[in-house]
Structure formats: C-alpha cells, structure tokens
Image (cartoon, helix red, strand yellow):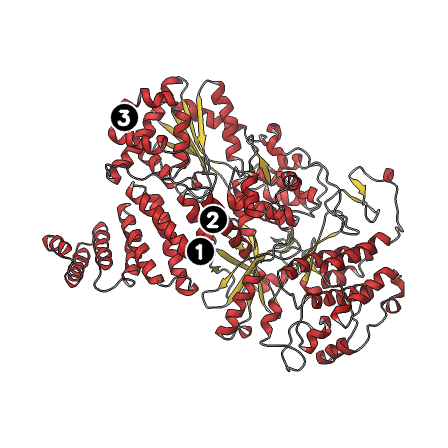
Amino acid sequence: MSTRGCPQCAFSCDAESHYCPHCGFPVGAVSMKNEDPLVGKVLPGGYQVVDLLGVGGMGRVYRAEQRALGRTVAVKVIHPHLLSDEKSLARFMTEARATSQLNHPNSVSVIDFGKTDDGHPYLVMEFLRGRNLAQVQALEGPLSIPRIIGVLQQVLLALGEAHELEMIHRDLKPENIVLEPLRRGGDFVKVVDFGLAKLKTTEAPGITMPGIVCGTPDFMAPEQGRGDPIDGRSDLYAVGVVLFWLLTGRLPFESSSPTQVVLMHISMPVPNARELAPQREIPDALLAVLNKALAKNAKDRFQDAHEFVDALQECGERRPDPAARQAQELPSEFLQCPTCQQWVPHVRYCYECGHRLPERSLPPSPAQDRLLLFLGREEDLLWLEHRWRQSSVGPCLVRIIGEPGVGKSRLVEEFRKTAEANDALFVGAGPDPYWAEVAGYTLRTLLTQLVSPEALGGRATRLSENGRAAMHQLLLSPAGGSDLNPSAALRSATLQRQGNAELLGWALDVARASRPAGVVVLLDDLDRVDGLTRQTLDDYLPLLEPGIFIIATHTPQLRVEWPHEQVRLLNGLPAHIATDLLQRSSMKQLPVILSELGNRGIPPLYIDQVLAFGFDGGSDPPARLADLIAHRLSTLEPDLRRVLQGLAVLGDDVSEALLSEMLGQRYVTPDVVERLLRTRLARRNSSERLSLIHPLLHDLVRLATPAEVRRDLHAKAAQAFQQHDAPLEVLAEHAVLAQDSMTALFFLEQVANRAFSRGDDRTATSALSRGLDLAREEIYRGQLEDPMRAIAIFGRKLGTTLNRRGLHSDAEGVLLETLDSTEPASGERLDVLEQLAEAAAGRGKGAEAARYKSQALQVAQAANLHEAVTRLSAV
C-alpha cells in the first residue's frame, strides 16, 4: 500500500487515510485541495506553496517551504473581497506591519508579508503543528481545570505583549488559540490572527452598522458590540468567554441570531457557571475570576492581562491536589511543581498549572563528544587523508559538500589533528564575523596565519611592485578595516588582482619552506566567504604547487569549478547510529522519523537538537532540521528569544557589551546569557564572546524573527556599528535590512566603487545588484524622491561590471532595463549604450554592437559631449 508523509508531523500515513493516525491532521483534505492554482507557485521571498491547508473567514491558508532554508512556513492569502480597493489594501499593509512587531513565544510570528504576482496580499507565518482549542475540546472532551488555567495563562501572556504595543486582537476565540502537546502532557499555546479582524470593518463597527462585524459575536465585549471605542480589556472579556465555555461546555449567551447574541452580551447577566456545570465543582476563586472577566463595564474587569494571569495563578495555588503522589513512586525525571505541588515530568513548564520549573543541566552535547559525533565518518576521514598524501607530489585541492549541519567542519577538524600530528601547518578561515562578506576579510585572516611579522620584512623583496602593494593593503593597513582603496599610484584593477594572487602564492611558499610536511589551508563555509577572497583564490589556483593542500567546505547550492580538485559529498549518519545515540529518548514517533530520514542520512546537528528539543518538553520532533530548530526558536522565553535574535543580527564573536548596547541592559544579564547557553543554540568562545552554535542558525533565527522586529534590530545594529567604525559592507548590510533605503544606497555605491577600482568584481557585482533591487522596490515603497535615478546609476555600473566579468548576456539584460531610466541626451545614456555595444560584441553580435555605437554617437552629439563624439567617430 502506498504511503505519504503527514504535513504536520511527518508520520507515514496510508495514501487513502483521511486523517493522520498520529496527530489527527486532515491529510485527505490536503490532497483534495491541491488543485488550487496557487499550489506549486513561488511567492516573492522564495516561498514555494505546497498545500492548501484550509479556508477561513479571512483567507486561504497554505503550507509553503522557504526554499533557501528548507523550512516549512504557513502562508495566509487574504480573500480579495476583503481588500477590494487601495484604501483597504493600505490598511492591510499597516495591520501586517503592526502584527509583525509581536515577538512573544505565545504569539504566532509574522515573518514576512507582501502581494502575490496577481496582487493578492499575503502573510507568511511560522507553521503551527498543533490543533486549535475548539478541536482539542471536541476530540478530548472537557479539559481539566489545571489544564485550562495553563492554557489561558499563555493566551494572556501573548495578549499582554500585544496590548503593551497598543494592539488589540479583536477576535479572540477557540479557533484562534492553537495548542501543541508537550512531551508527557501539557500544552504550548500560540495565539493567531492578531489584528486581522479589523480588516473586515471600515469605521466604527457595531450592531448599528448592519452586515459589518469586527470580531465574532459569541465572544464580543459589550462595548465592542455597541461600537464604542475598545482597548485591551475587550480582549480580556473574550478570554472570559473562552474560560466560561471551557468550564461549562457552552457559551454564556446563545441564539440563532448574531445580533441577538451581541445584545445579550450588552444587557443580560452572565449565567452561573457552577449551576450549569455542577460536576466541575468550580472553586470559588476561579468563579470569582470568571465573573470579573465577564463584567459588563470594562472598569470592573481585570485592567490588564498580567493582572488576569496573577488571578489565575492564585486559583492554581489554592486548588487541592486530589491525586498527590509520593516522590519515591516516580522516576527520577519527575519533580514536584513548587506552585501546584503536582508531580510532573522534568520539562520546562508544569503542564498542570503552567509554572516555570527549576532548570536542570542538559546532558552532554554530541557536538562536544568526539566518539558520538564521529561515528560513521571513518571512510570520509580516510579519503581526506589519502588526498592529502597526493598533494605532496602534485597539485591537489578538495571540496567537501554537504547540507547544513551534516558535519563538514567537524570532519575537517578531525583531519586537522592528523595533519598537525605529522608536522603540517594547518591554517583556516571562514566568513567574517559580521556575516556581511567584508571584502578581503578571509584572505587577510589566512595571510596573517601564513606569514610571520619577521617574514614580511625579510622575504618580501621577492614580491613584485604589485605584490608589495597588495601586502600593504591586506597586511599592513589598520587592522580590521575594509579600506582597501587603490594605492597612490592608482594602479589598474587588473594589476591589483595580479598582486593579490601573487601575495597569496608568496605567503604559501614562505609557509611551506618552514614546514616540510606541507601546508593545509581550510576555507570553511565558502558560500559565505567574501568576493575578494574567492576571486583571489580563483586567480591563484592555476598556479597551485605540490605541498599545498586546500580544503573548501560549502553547501550544494554553490557552483564552483576549480583545477586539480576532487569532490566529496558528505551525507548524514545512518539511522542505526542515530538511533543508538537517541536510545534514551521517550519520543514515541522518533524511531519512525529516524528510519525515514536514514535513506539520506541524519545530520549530527539534528541529533544534537533533538536531544535539546526533548529537554524543552517538546513532543515528537519535526523531521527536517530547519523545522526542528525553527520550532525550538518559536517556544523560547521572551528574554532568551530577544538575546538570540540580537546575536543573529550582530553576527559571531559578539561582546556582551555590544549586545547590551543594541538590546538594552535589561535583556543582557548574566542569568539570561547563561540560560541561553544551556539551550544549545548559542556558545561562548575562549575570549568570552558569544556566537550562535552553527551558521544555519544565523539565517533561521533572523528570518524567524517577526518582520518589524527584525527591521528594528537591524536599524539598531546599524547605529551601533557606525559608532564602532565597522567596515562599509557591514553598514550597508544593516541599512538594507533596516529598509533605510537612502543610507543603504549610499553605502552600497561606496562598496561597489571601491571594489570596482581594485578589480574586485565579485564584491562590486553583489553590492550593485542589491542596490538595483532596492531602487526597484522604491518605485512602489516611496522612500526615495527619484528611484528612477537610482536605477540608472546602479544599473549602468552593474552592467559595466558584468561586462568586465565576461557575463555579457546578463549585462545586456540589466543595461536594457537601465536605458529606459536615463535622460535622452545625457552622459549616463551614452555610457549605457557603449556598454550595450560591448555586451553585443562579447556575444558575437557585430551588427548589433555597431547599432548601439551609432546610437551612442547620436546621444554624444545631442549632449555636446565633444570628447565622446571624437572617440566614437574614430571607431
């Protein structure tokens, strides 16, 4: 019988199944809805729509994959009839921007928003794997009072953050409360659809405006039904209605007419919940909390969400323990909650009352245990050692390719021990710590490891003038600067490139002369290494000599072709090894997931994160590494979440002082930092600086951060780095991501100009491409006074750079677009036409090149550019 994976839990279901037998997800409904025209399309931002999950009052919800990361997200496409004009569309964008400020673990994160190609607005959110509260109540029957208290406390914490941001939910109901079961019981809660109810209304909604309802009548506060101004206390009333429904199994007011229900909320007293559900034996304290939450006058209710949380907490503390058990009857992994006195599994939160439990130490990480992590890698290590021996008699370099988390860097680190034990010099470098591709950073790092200060003076006479100029720029200029301006002689870009390659070859020769066993050079995470380093390496590799062994690691997405190379594809660990490492896990679905993953191998980072996931109290883990980490990120406490997001924005090797400067001292405390380190998401190096544990986390954490929160963090990082004289590339990166278009274009142009003048065409291309994309966006966003002018500047320079790299077809496409942005009789139009002629000539289109030159001559004559007229007339 054929099978298919459940989109929610990855359980292998029969193809004919209507529901997943493991989690209850409607897999049959998904398969029937795949005829939706949006399924299979890629939205802006690289989100590929996979399945239609459901249709609601606000829109259609899809499961999508963020292709760059392999992460599952949810996409909600808003119904067109709700946004039928420009005014309502503008309101949607405002609400989306406001909603994407929410940064609480109990609020669903809005990580992106925009419009589809056909103009339909959409939200991109974290993918939730649980059921909504209405489904849970229907499937499991009445929830216990302790469980109700735990669920609603988390709902209120989410509302509390929203209310502090002056944001009101307006439509809180069981369908907008999603529960995910924690391992061995309990729930983790997410509140969804913040602010979207407002899109259904125009001015002041209420029963006086027929057909227009902001919210669901069954859960509306009296003032909301009257159309009066509302605030956060209206949401707290809705929580009171949810509490009534959970306790009694019915709503406080019911009628076939929505208008009648609204009127009943306004005028009728709340029924006695204890009389409606005598079997519940509702405690007096909880009944008092319920009645206060449902007060008709907002002044008589709880005045904020935190007051409501405290009142529920007191109800939990006063509740007797009918099933008290002795500690000696339970396994050691259970403990007694200090709040409700229940014995519960040793996870993060008590699943009885929601209280945070005392911390315990994580088990040792496989990433720190050579015997655990290095199981199954013996053949890969032998292959690497064999290629190294070959490098002693002939040029040899290797590329180790694998998905993130598969253990590429760990394999090389193990090989390093062998090389150094045989007296080889091992040097290595990866991307710059800012993750901004700072020009020359990796090359400079390698050179400083290869050449001692004494060698700089004693043997530099072997270098040509170009090589000595490169030495001055890369090794003798002020440390850490990206100021790689041309020397005073203004040498040509070609000579600068030659000098950089010569300097690298000279440094390797010097190092090899002192180490008969040879030199090993590691370029880790090559796909993130700066363009100047990669270009210099490309120029040097044809000259590679015996005794120098180069290793590069990167993901499969990078396309590289080098001389003398050999390639090793690194897969994950076999399923049986992963199963042995995780044999103590009590996650019931894990063996099935490991078996299915075993066909393509299980990344060691996945194993490490599964162990941490279990410690978090998670239920059965997602089957993909990116989804597993994203899930862990979504449940982090607010203070840990904020610090982790700050690290993802700032980069690696971040000082606590810089982190505190950006986030504020109240977030970066010793307690928070130590708790974050225990999550296995961050680490501290020997210099007491902080980094995320793996490059994959930089993208996952940053792109899982709500969109407006992310923009604000980049703006703060830009300000902090400007005060610390960071490289231009860093300032440009944060200005772009902070959506400060004018500043970003200024820095990007500077980065490109410097790169172009020194022959660093890769960096120039990257900066100009980003600038051109930003200028295009500004046509619709409206921050720039003259975006067409920006398009003309960046397009012309990008076309020139692409021509210089020999990418004539790409250059032609950019230049043709740019031509429409230039004035008819201007020097810019002349430059574009000349570059179009060069692109056509490079493609072997002589007649086309002649036509562009003729047009260029006409422009030069019209603009009275006499020097250009003379030059073009002579051709």
Q: Nearer the viewer, mark 2 or mark 3?
A: 2
The dot on residue 740 is 1
**Would you call the spot at circle 2 few (<14 residues within 10 Å), some (14-19), or many (20 or more)?**
many
Which residue bears the numbered disc 3?
463
Which residue bears the numbered disc 2?
718
Quadrant location of residue 448? top left
Separation of disc 2 and disc 1 at Cα? 10 Å
First in sequence: mark 2 vs mark 1: 2
Whether residues under marks 1 and 3 lie with C-beta atoms below 8 angstroms apart, the answer is no
Q: Secondary structure at mark 3?
A: loop
Q: Tell me which residue sits at (32%, 28%) in the image.
A: 505
Q: Nearer the viewer, residue 725 or 321?
A: 725
Q: Secondary structure at mark 1?
A: loop
**In the image, residue 715 lies at what x, y percent?**
49, 52
Q: Nearer the viewer, residue 373 or 269?
A: 269
First in sequence: mark 2 vs mark 3: 3
**In the image, residue 518 lies at what x, y percent?**
40, 21
Q: Which amino acid is tagged 1?
A: Asp
Quadrant location of residue 291? bottom right
Quadrant location of residue 96? bottom right
Q: Which amino acid is tagged 3?
A: Leu
**In the image, residue 319 lies at what x, y percent?**
86, 54
**Would you call the spot at circle 1 few (<14 residues within 10 Å), some (14-19), or many (20 or more)?**
some
Q: Tell me which residue sits at (37%, 48%) in the image.
A: 766
Whether residues under marks 2 and 1 lie with C-beta atoms below 8 angstroms apart, the answer is yes
Residue 533 against residue 856 in the figure, above or below: above
Horizontally, residue 12 falls left or right of residue 142, namely left
**Residue pushed farthest left?**
874
Q: Which amino acid is tagged 2?
A: Ala
